Amino acid sequence: MRHLCSAAFVLCFVLSLSACGNGPPSALTFEPPFDRNPTTITRAPGGACPAAQCVYLALQFEYRGLPDEIAIYPRVARGGSPPSAVIAGRQTQLDLPQGMAFNSAGSLYVANYRKITIYAPGVQGNVAPSGVLQGSRTGLARPSGIAFDTAGNLYVVNNATPSVTVYAAGATGNIAPMRTISGSSTQLSYPWGVALDAQGNVYVTNFSSITEYGANAAGNVAPIAVISGNATGLGGGVHGIAFDASANIYVVANQNDIDASLSEFAAGSNGNVAPIRRVVGDNTQMIEPVGLALDRSGDAYVLDWGGDTDYSGMLVFGPQANGDVAPDRALIGRKYFDFRNVGGLAIH
């Protein structure tokens, strides 16, 4: 069994590893280009990362006695490429980082174990956050996924106490949410990821479903749509979620804790509906996907924990990928050495 957590913090989903096999696909094997020890982080300089073409990965190193970090890569990075830059160090206040999102001003918001840390546009290195959302009034309870609406309001999915908490644009400190979606009618169950469509409707991935709530929903409200059932392929472990330019819904999941998949559902899907495309099978190299982002060209970036193997990383699939297909490229790191646990990703 696999837990997305530290020994001190029993957290999230408990997923079976019966399909993980005995090791990583041979195509992904490499010797990492940089080393770590318990007190220092040494990096070879990576390739350039032009504006709007960067991938940010949340990496958890706490188990090694090192600070967690956000690693920044060019979108075209592959193999064992080192990052172009990192946000790392004690001053960053990163603590088991998970989901990430950028607001319209380019500030990076990171969901940590107990808080949301905010970083000014373009920062790197051992920098203090420009703001922190934290405290007893916030309602944060192991936040995992975050997203913004068009007004800049922040939506946070809380995994420990199933809920979505919404904060006014620019909120920091120990401040109460302006709205909260929670309660038995919501059908929230081990929620993980969140995304908003163009109309402001809120989509949340749960252990085996996707629930949708209307714009401005609050309280113990029933979802206005639920994607769930055998036909969906969402048997368990649904994690990242994103929309393409046509409002189609993309999610990554492990069906019945076995088949790792990237699925696309038609815009407006509801009920026990089949995806219009599904990437699944041994050739995909997916083992246990936990994060998802789409770039402007429609490429899907899948963050994979790697299950029982010694490797985790990012796999990229083109807009037309379907079935048991190999990724267009892969960025893979050795766990306990350079990637350890992967938490979330964002493109900016």
Image (cartoon, rainbow, N blue to C red):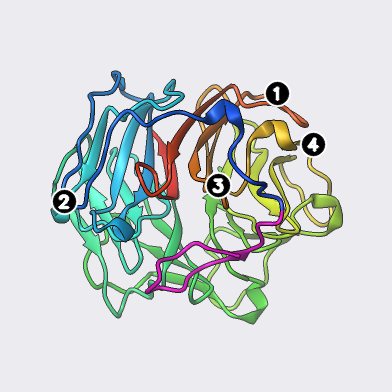
Tell me if mark 1 has few (under 14), some (14-19) or many (20+) residues whose alpha carbon lies within 10 angstroms of its own.
few
> In terms of sequence position, does the residue under pointer 4 or pointer 2 come before the other?
2
Q: Position of residue 20 (x, y in %)?
A: 66, 49
Determine whether 90 is above or below 338 in the image.
below
Which mark is nearer the camera, 4 or 2?
A: 2
Of 10 and 219, which appears nearest the observer?
10
Quadrant housing residue 138: bottom left
Mark 2 or mark 3: whose residue is earlier in sequence: 2
- The image position of residue 211, as x and y in percent, is 66, 61
Disc 2 to disc 3, how far (Cα)?
25 Å
User: In the drawing, what numbered circle is on residue 39?
Assistant: 2
- Kind of residue at badge 2: Thr
Residue identified by numbered label 3: 309
The residue labelled by disc 4 is 276
Report how far apart the C-alphas of labels 4 and 2 lie in the structure. Answer: 48 Å
Please state which amino acid type lies under the numbered disc 4. Answer: Ile
Instruction: Please state the extent of the stretch shown in magenta in the rendering.
Output: 1-18
In the picture, the quarter occupied by the N terminus is bottom right
Q: Residue at x 83, y 45 (%)?
A: 274
Q: Residues within 10 Å of mark 3 (few under 14, many from 20)?
A: some
Magenta part mainly helix, strand or loop? loop
Residue 118 shows in the view: yes
Q: Secondary structure at mark 2?
A: loop
Give the mark nearer the N terminus: 3 vs 4.
Answer: 4
Which of the two discs, 3 and 1, labels the residue nearer the N terminus?
A: 3
Q: Which mark is residue 320?
A: 1
Q: Earlier in the sequence, mark 1 or mark 4?
A: 4
Mark 1 residue element: loop
